[in-house]
Image: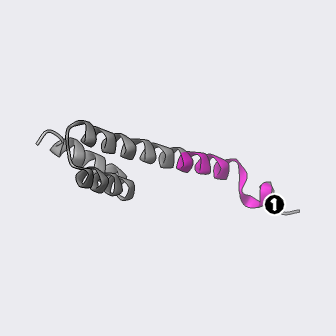
Amino acid sequence: MSGGVGMSGFGIMGIFMLLVLFALFILNIITSVWAYQDAKRMGRSNEYALLLLIGTLFFPVAGIIVYLIIRRL
């Protein structure tokens, strides 16, 4: 007589939210590694590429946008 929602209140929406968060986390990792490899391929230094990797890991959307803007400079 708990009122309806199964799995201790977690439910389908909770599982869906976890899957979305997991997908965003994986996408963040993929884009950060791509930015690192792209910087290395364009002849940037190891320090620059590593700083880019760390920046895009902690600031995923802003980091990728900034990198795409300054990429050709």
In the displayed orientation, state which residue is furthest to the right.
1
Q: How is the image coloured?
A: one colour
Residue 23: x percent and y percent?
Answer: 53, 44
Q: Main secondary structure of the magenta part?
A: helix
Magenta region includes residue 10: yes
Residue positioned 26% across, 51% down in the render: 46
Under mark 1, the amino acid is Gly
Residue positioned 78% across, 61% down in the render: 8
- Quadrant in which the C terminus appears: top left
Residue positioned 26% across, 36% down in the render: 41
Is 68 left or right of 14, judged from the image as shown? left
For the record, the magenta segment spans 7-22
The residue wearing badge 1 is 3
Residue 57: x percent and y percent?
Answer: 38, 54
Magenta region includes residue 49: no
- Quadrant in which the N terminus appears: bottom right
Total number of numbered discs in the rendering: 1
Residue 68: x percent and y percent?
Answer: 22, 41
Residue positioned 14% across, 38% down in the render: 72
Is 54 left or right of 40, judged from the image as shown? right
Is 41 left or right of 15, judged from the image as shown? left
Label 1, residues with CA under 10 Å away: few <14, some 14-19, many ≥20: few
Please state which of residues 24 and 35 is positioned toward the viewer in this rendering: 35
